[in-house]
Image (tube, rainbow, N blue to C red):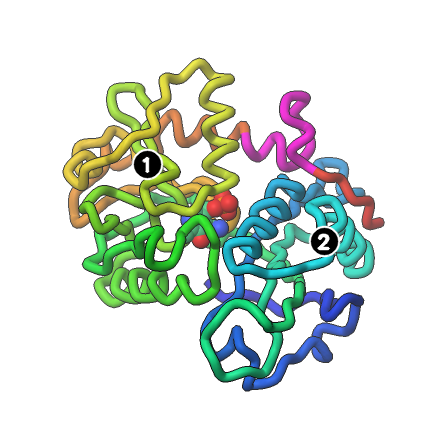
Amino acid sequence: MAFSEQMEYAYFEGKIVPFAEAKISIGTHVVQYGTGAFAGIRAYVSADGQAVNIVRLKDHCTRLLRSSKILRMDLPFTPDTLGEAIIELTRKNAPKTDTYYRPFVYKASVELTPRLTGLKDEFACYMLPMGDYLDTTRGMNMMVTSWTRTEDNMIPSRGKITGSYINASFAKDQAMSYGADDAIMLNSRGKVAEGSAANLFIVRDGVLITAPVTGDILEGITRRSVLALAQDLGLQVEQREIDRSELYIADEVFFCGTGVQVAWVGTIDGRTIGDGQRGQISKQLYDELFKIFRGEASDHSDWVTRVEVS
Ligand code: PMP
């Protein structure tokens, strides 16, 4: 998709500055070696139009700080104070549209050696208006990429590490080159891991199945929301390894993530999934999630942080 302009202000080096002034040197460690980690957060305009609802802010901040721990960073934030910085930036930009946030932490020193300690660490965040990342109005055409998902002992997927997205880029690039919308990645054991930038669920005979957190996936926050909603809806859920061929015979397959939201899959490697229509379960989960995001549900209202912007 084409992204529109970034919003006017960004958080950079401890303060809010115009986006155009939030710049780093070409010699910065993160630019040279990918030694950063990031989050992707969404906020949705509330049903009353007076506010935006930031989705699972504290969970995203917690995951980002855990990523920073994996990268041996030393940052002066807790999940709460990081969340406050993001809320402050939201008030400053006062978005009137659905919004995407890109918070990230990075090795900010200009330094040649690829290493993790003895380097300055920074946090930055910018915002942009964003609608669908993957079209959710039609079935996505997916391919199983020949690129293998990096293992935890290579570059940990749960770290949401900047450099690891080269792996995702190869996968997405291959899928797009073959005319597919996105890629499904297998891990080094040949089991289904996830999409290039989303977690993956299948439905078989009414059972909702997703790879375990030890399956070389990102521990997705939308994945967690989907699992909680599935429990509310009384669905049977399994977190277990998924074989490639199970994708082909599933009744439903969908991607989920902050960016993709819940995007249903129409075909995989040329095979129609289910009857080729949007499945009941993926539709129900999508609808439930959006009620929560717009502030229209009583359950799970703690998943959103309402920020008045008008
Ligand atoms: N897996 C990968 C590789 C991702 O990049 C993302 C997007 N952040 C996800 C899964 C979904 O995670 P979340 O629901 O936390 O956005």
The residue tagged 1 is 211
Q: Label 1, secondary structure: give it.
A: loop
Nearer to us in this view, 292 or 171: 171
Residue 51 placement: quadrant = top right
Tell me if 172 is positioned left or right of 41 in this view: left
Label 2 belongs to which residue?
A: 77
Most extreme residue toward the top, as rendered? 234
Of mark 2 and mark 1, the one earlier in the sequence is 2
Magenta residues, start to end? 289-304
Q: Position of residue 272 (x, y in %)?
A: 20, 40
- Return the residue nearer the eye: 109 or 305: 109
User: What is the quadrant of residue 102 in the picture?
Assistant: bottom right
> Is the residue marked by circle 2 packed among few (<14), some (14-19), or many (20+) residues within 10 Å?
some
Depicted 119 relative to depicted 295: above or below: below
Q: Is residue 268 left or right of residue 169?
A: left
Count the marks. 2
Q: Is residue 42 magenta?
A: no
- Residue 284, can we see it? yes
Looking at the picture, does residue 262 appear above or below residue 165?
A: above
Q: Position of residue 207 (x, y in %)?
A: 31, 21
Task: Kindly report the distance in space between the C-alpha atoms of the residues bearing marks 2 and 1.
Answer: 31 Å
